[in-house]
Image: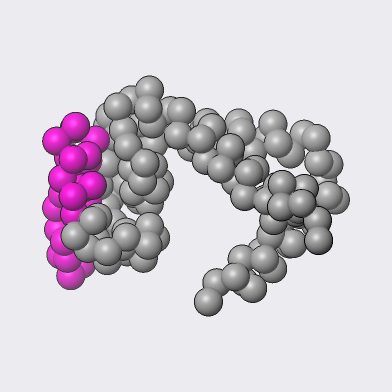
Amino acid sequence: MTKPTASTLYRLIEAGHLARQALLAPLAARGLEVGDDAVLLGLADPSGVPTATLEAFTGLDGDHLDAILRRLEDKGLLLRLAVGPEMVPGARLSQQGQSTRAAIEDHWRQLEDTIAEDLGKKTRKSLRRGLKRIITLLDF
């Protein structure tokens, strides 16, 4: 058997961990916590997003999401309100929240571009396909 640290699975986990750490940098710089980025990125619609949609987007249960929304609201990053024609509970980003979301998204894009530079278009596409297959196999 191959040494665990030399295995593809180990390298995949290591790369994922390091990528996540790099993506957390703009959060820490703004006093935000792990998971806040998912909520901010999920609030792309300027008119607001229903809480149920945010739960599905982030994979968070209602209580955990509610705590994050409350904290982000206290920081002035979002407003909690009724959204859509049915006026269901939801949230939308404040101007400061939109700016924070844009910075996080830009950081994500820069990291993606840096990684992609070394791969080339064909290898990048193949890697994306392979990772999608791995995710499908492991999502049980």
Q: Residue at x 37, y 27 (%)?
A: 28
Q: Is residue 113 left or right of residue 122?
A: left
Q: Residue at x 77, y 34 (%)?
A: 117
Nearer to me, 76 or 9? 9
Nearer to me, 19 or 49? 19
Q: Is residue 2 left or right of residue 136?
A: right
Nearer to me, 15 or 37? 15
Count all numbered tags in the image, as a single digit. 0
Residue 112 vs 64, above or below: the answer is above
> Residue 73: x and y, percent?
17, 40
> Residue 87: x and y, percent?
15, 65
Q: Is residue 138 left or right of residue 116?
A: left
> Within the magenta stretch, is there residue 85?
yes
Q: Quadrant of the N terminus?
A: bottom right
List the single residue furthest toward the bottom. Answer: 140
> Within the magenta stretch, is there residue 78?
yes
> Residue 106: x and y, percent?
52, 32
Q: Is residue 44 in sight in this rendering?
A: no
Range of the magenta residues?
66-91
> Residue 66: x and y, percent?
19, 54
Residue 128 vs 107, above or below: the answer is below
Q: Residue at x 71, y 52 (%)?
A: 4
Q: Residue at x 22, y 63 (%)?
A: 62
